[in-house]
Image (tube, rainbow, N blue to C red):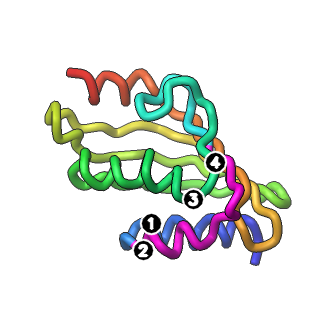
Amino acid sequence: MSSVERAQAMYGAFATGDVPTVLGGMDPGIHWSEAEGNPYQPSGAPWVGPQAILDNLFMKLATEWENYTVHPEKFYDAGDSAVVEGRYSGKYLATGVEIDVAYCHVFTFAGDKLVRFQQYANTAALEQAMSQ
């Protein structure tokens, strides 16, 4: 399977709520970094390990947002990495603000496991939606 196919499979599992499959595709020592300024991890420091990602991100997305959706649009094969352009949408429940925010994700694989993830996104739009 190519890096693009692996990334597509992870997006597919996430879209159907199959979080165990997403977490199972991660290396135990994965480094997951949100864009600097992202309200969930403003420093951009990585979370290490699937449990940290589940606790600090996935659980919050599931409970703090209505219809939170990740829309991958373009995939680029970069060998062991896949670069993905897309958009996030959803409504932040605490403020009622809806988003439509561009993102770029970089997935890096070692064999069949995701070892590194880097998000780039319009963090100002996320901050605005989450703080009004």
Q: Is residue 11 above or below residue 91?
A: below
The residue tagged 2 is 18
Q: Secondary structure at mark 2?
A: loop
Residue 57 image position (x, y, % from top left): 43, 47
Q: From this viewpoint, which residue is outermost toward the right?
A: 79
Q: Residue at x 25, y 45 (%)?
A: 64
Q: Which mark is residue 14?
A: 1
Magenta-colored span: 18-32
The residue tagged 4 is 48
The residue tagged 3 is 50
Q: Is residue 11 above or below residue 73?
A: below
Camera-side mark, 3 or 1 = 3
Say whether disc 3 or disc 1 marks the residue closer to the N-terminus. Answer: 1
Residue 124 image position (x, y, % from top left): 41, 21
Which amino acid does the dot numbered 1 rest on?
Answer: Phe
Camera-side mark, 3 or 2 = 3
Q: Quadrant of residue 94?
A: top left
